[in-house]
Image: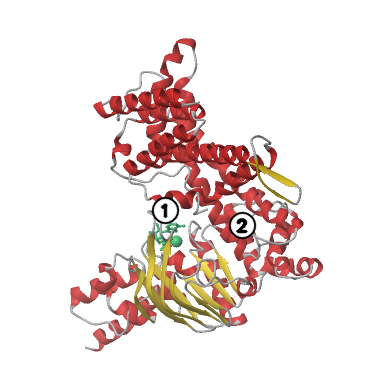
């Protein structure tokens, strides 16, 4: 399902003294099956944008096309449940939404709300647990008896169980250890490749965005200021620093080398592997001279 | 959630904002008593005028106040109709399907609803123009004579300020959890009773867990720092009683006397 926004604006608590414009001039296209990362400073409107993808928030101006749905500002859309089945959102700190007595029940909650039978849901819990890398033993435990990282996985399994076409992730790896981060990010990448899911990832980590996404959107003070492939985005490092973003260490390293030796790397180095490759080509060139 | 304005503070620099919180608290307590003095057109008229004056001085937009009152409006309307239907005094104004409506009943219904409305407007005005910290400081100061009888005034004030402090946090949390569960297919606004109960569990369990966690964290943080607030503590913001505070107190005193004289 494609997502197309035209001139979308969102104001919180509109027509009160607390009115706050959190989004404006949003034009965005997210093609079915793509992997898009959204980065930006805290308060730049990332979470607000995400909540428009399943109609939790509706534009106060402009139009949002979400698959078959067209949400126009000012018109209250009523039946949004089918849309919410198609767009699964994993909120920041999703472990805060757990409430059932057992992991199994909590994971089945979403799919059953969308009409799956209890037997079918229970029969498939094992599959969903495996998907997020949890052992079968946790199935009958209380989710509150698990570690923080495991609770996060249970919550994510609960959203994956809805089998959405679009998976929206709001800083899913915040607060996890590096290994947990990597496992989780690899899992999302797999879902995109194998199940053809569309993935929208909000992250603070430029490294994650660079490594996993096909497309990067940069938000700044409520609007989209840059959009492009990781190579395009990281070509202009000063620009990113100017927007107050944390540029990947690898890119900073590359820039330092380039300035020091007055040379130009063939491509932006977004990962450690890129740096290694680029350095090797440089060395061989130097040796030949 | 966004409709609720009771308990919210609207920053501002109006005359009412600048009053000493003690004045505002006293004003409100006195008001709550003298509202019951009103019992005819004149006295209700004066009270309404006074309330409108306060609202005007506070610079809170009238429409904003009205929208905030919406949630309680049906209670007011209900009160009105209850009086109209149950009071049987005066002359019959009209009859319809065996229901007799008396003129005194309409009058009484209107007065009682107005009284209710005025009380809500004034109490809301207090919280809209006073920060929770000011409210508790004012309370503590007003209640401090009770310390002589070993009433833990400071602790009570602290409890109050902590509760007030966490109301917005709790509201935010509620909104966040509701959104997360809505995204998982929960419908909070319609559906059969059983599903609604389930929806409430999905909201309340996470909410209670986070509230207890927060309370525990706060208690531990205070404990490890050896918090002893009631002993030898000085204040960063001292309350100062100004001339306008005296003026307002005199004003409400006059209002009370006027109501007393004009009531029938
Ligand atoms: N429920 C809300 N009510 C009012 N303002 C909000 C609400 N949620 C977010 N905001 C404001 O909207 C802006 C964007 O917030 P958000 O979308 O959460 O940013 P990000 O996710 O990029 O940190 C912020 O200034 C924030 O204070
Ligand atoms: Mg956010």
Check disc 1 and report the residue beneath it. Answer: B63
Residue B68 spot, x, y in % from top left: 48, 49
In this view of the protein, which residue sits in the foreground, B46 or A204? Answer: B46
In this view of the protein, which residue sits in the foreground, A34 or A188? Answer: A34
Check disc 2 and report the residue beneath it. Answer: A150
Nearer the viewer's eye, disc 2 or disc 1?
A: 1
B39 horizontally vs A234: left or right:
right
Q: Does the residue at mark 2 contact the one at mark 1 (Cβ under 8 Å)?
A: no
A43 horizontally vs A135: left or right:
left
Q: Quadrant of residue A14?
A: bottom left
Chain under callout 1 = B
Vertical position of residue A53 compared to residue B164: above or below = below
> Residue extending furthest bottom?
A288
In this view of the protein, which residue sits in the foreground, A222 or B258? Answer: B258
- Residue B16 is marked as none
Dot 2 beta carbon under 8 Å from ligand 2 = no
- Tell me the distance, in whole angstroms, between the alpha carbons under discs 2 and 1: 49 Å
Instruction: Please determine if labels 2 and 1 lie on a single subunit.
Output: no
């Amino acid at each position: 399902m494609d997502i197309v926004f035209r001139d979308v604006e969102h104001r919180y608590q509109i027509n009160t003294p607390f009115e706050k414009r959190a989004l404006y001039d949003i034009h965005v296209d997210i093609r079915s099956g793509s992997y898009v990362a959204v980065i930006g400073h805290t308060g730049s409107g990332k979470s607000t944008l995400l909540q428009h993808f399943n109609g939790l928030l509706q534009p106060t101006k402009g139009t949002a096309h979400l698959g078959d749905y067209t949400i126009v500002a000012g018109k209250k859309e009523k039946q949004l449940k089918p849309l919410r089945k198609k767009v699964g959102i994993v909120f920041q700190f999703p472990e805060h939404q757990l409430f059932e007595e057992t992991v199994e029940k909590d994971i089945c909650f979403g799919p059953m709300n969308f009409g799956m039978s209890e037997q079918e849901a229970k029969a498939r819990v094992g599959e969903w647990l495996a998907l997020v890398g949890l052992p079968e033993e946790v199935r009958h435990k209380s989710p509150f008896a698990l570690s923080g990282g495991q609770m996060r996985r249970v919550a994510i399994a609960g959203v994956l169980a809805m089998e959405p076409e679009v998976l929206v992730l709001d800083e899913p790896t915040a607060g996890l250890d590096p290994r947990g981060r990597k496992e989780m990010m690899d899992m999302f990448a797999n879902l995109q490749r194998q199940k053809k899911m569309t993935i929208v990832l909000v992250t603070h980590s430029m490294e994650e965005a660079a490594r996993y996404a096909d497309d990067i959107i940069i938000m700044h003070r409520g609007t989209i200021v840059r959009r492009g492939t990781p190579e395009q985005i990281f070509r202009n490092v000063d620009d990113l620093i100017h927007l107050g973003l944390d540029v990947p260490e690898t890119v900073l390293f590359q820039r330092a080398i380039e300035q020091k030796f007055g040379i130009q790397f063939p491509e932006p180095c977004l990962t450690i592997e890129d740096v290694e490759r680029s350095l090797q080509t440089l060395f061989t060139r130097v040796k030949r001279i | 959630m966004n409709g609720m304005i009771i308990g919210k503070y609207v920053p501002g620099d109006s005359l009412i904002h600048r009053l000493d919180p003690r004045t505002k608290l006293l004003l409100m307590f006195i008001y709550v008593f003298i509202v019951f003095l009103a019992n005819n057109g004149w006295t209700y008229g004066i009270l309404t005028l006074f309330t409108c004056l306060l609202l005007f001085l506070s610079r809170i937009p009238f429409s904003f106040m009205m929208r905030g009152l919406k949630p309680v409006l049906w209670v007011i309307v209900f009160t009105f109709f209850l009086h109209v239907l149950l009071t049987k005094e005066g002359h019959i104004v009209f009859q319809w399907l065996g229901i007799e409506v008396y003129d005194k009943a309409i009058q009484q219904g209107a007065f009682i609803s107005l009284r209710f409305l005025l009380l809500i407007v004034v109490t809301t005005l207090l919280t809209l123009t006073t920060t929770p910290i000011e409210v508790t400081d004012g309370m503590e100061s007003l209640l401090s004579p009770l310390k002589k009888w070993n009433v833990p005034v400071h602790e009570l004030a602290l409890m109050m300020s902590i509760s007030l402090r966490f109301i917005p946090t709790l509201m935010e949390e509620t909104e966040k959890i509701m959104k997360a569960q809505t995204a998982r297919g929960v419908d909070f606004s319609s559906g059969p009773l059983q599903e609604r109960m389930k929806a409430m569990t999905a909201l309340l369990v996470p909410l209670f867990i986070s509230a207890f966690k927060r309370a525990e964290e706060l208690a531990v943080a205070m404990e490890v720092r050896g918090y002893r607030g009631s002993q030898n503590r000085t204040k960063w913001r001292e309350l100062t009683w100004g001339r306008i505070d005296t003026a307002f107190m005199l004003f409400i005193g006059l209002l009370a006397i006027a109501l007393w004289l004009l009531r029938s």
